[in-house]
Image: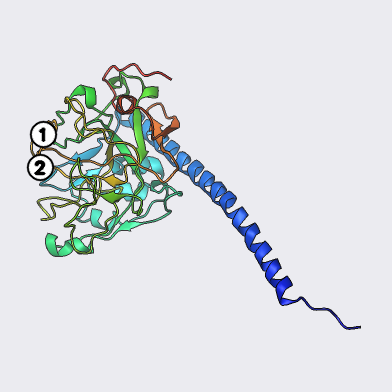
Amino acid sequence: MRRRAFSLVELLVVIAIIAILIALLLPAVQKVREAAGRISCTNNLKQFGLALQNYHDAVGSFPPGMTVNGSSVAETGTFSGLVPLLPYLEQDNWARIWDPTKTWYQSPNFDIVPIQIKVFYCPSNRTSGVIDTSFLVPFAGRPLPNVASADYLLCKGANAALCQYTQVPWTARGVFDVNTSTRLTDITDGTSNTFAMGEGAGGNPKYGIRRWYPDTTPAQGLFPGQSSNIDQSWSSGPMATVTLNTIGYLGGACLGVTAERGGNSDPWNEPMNNPLVLPALSFHNGCINSGTAPGTYDIISGFRSVHPNGCNFLFCDGSVRFMVQTINPDTYRALSTMAAGEVIGE
């Protein structure tokens, strides 16, 4: 008895059916993957919440958002407020070696900053990543480490001014700033109404760099070999410093803001998930960001994620909530400040 084989038409029909089934299945798989990534991202922020509370219990305050060993962020190297949290994130080995009197690019810190730490990455965005600094070496005139990235930002509030001693108006101050040590009792707006941290997705083509606040086009004149995608490390402050001869539009820092000039008549709102992000750069020109001309105000990035329609935020009471990007700008600024006295509804 002769066996009947599949005809070419039948085979093509079967392949077409399989292709259709796969096409129907892919969106569901992507949704499940995004849901898993978002849950993992939320869990990372909860770990940061525990670390911050344990740090506060041990020290009596939260860590500085950024530590500056000098008179100006633009002239000295700085390090991130995430560094003091290392012992509370099960990273004691690196914390013991870290020298707070040195910059991020000096020994022994030089050998620590490339370490990629899992909790610093949002799985929806990436699970690893470093910032290649080789393009800066000719300008800096010294070896530089390739710093490991991070996808989370400490909330600076609603003003991007960077100074050794903060002079940001109280109505615009966040829990974390340069050389500050905020206590829970300082958060008079309520810990359940105040951001501690938020997402800052980095190294993703979804988020580019712009030069000045009003710009609506990507920055031009970046360093040769520099990525056009915004990114920041868990260890360093702004990498743009006079000391390294690298003043320019580099990456971000460990801090995030909801406005650039909060406390002034026009706060210059920095909306969530803005596709063009301001890098971290200090112009050492005033400490309240009252200027409006280029070079007269400091800049810091806003919060951003790869989740649809919003970002996860850690509040100072340890809770994590997803905030939609269509949030009212006034409410968004109010949630980022700690002692402005705003009344925030549900």
Quadrant placement of the C terminus: top left
- Mark 2 sits on what residue? 295
Circle 1: element type: loop
Q: Position of residue 12 (x, y in %)?
A: 68, 71
Q: Position of residue 327 (x, y in %)?
A: 38, 29
Q: Residues within 10 Å of mark 1 (few under 14, many from 20)?
A: some
Q: Alpha-carbon distance for marks 2 and 1? A: 8 Å
Q: Are marks 2 and 1 in contact (CB under 8 Å)?
A: yes
Q: Which amino acid does the dot numbered 1 rest on? A: Gly
Task: State which quadrant residue 284 falls in.
Answer: top left
Q: How many marks?
A: 2
Whether residue 9 is situated above or below residue 67 in the rendered picture: below
Whether residue 261 is situated above or below residue 116 in the rendered picture: above
Q: Position of residue 93 (x, y in %)?
A: 35, 50
Camera-side residue: 69 or 287?
287
Whether residue 270 is situated above or below residue 77 in the rendered picture: above
Q: Position of residue 99 (x, y in %)?
A: 23, 48
Q: Which amino acid does the dot numbered 2 rest on? A: Gly
- Mark 1 sits on what residue? 291
Residue at 13 percent across and 55 percent down: it is 246
Task: State which quadrant residue 178 falls in.
Answer: top left
Circle 2: element type: loop
In this view, the residue farthest toward the front is 9
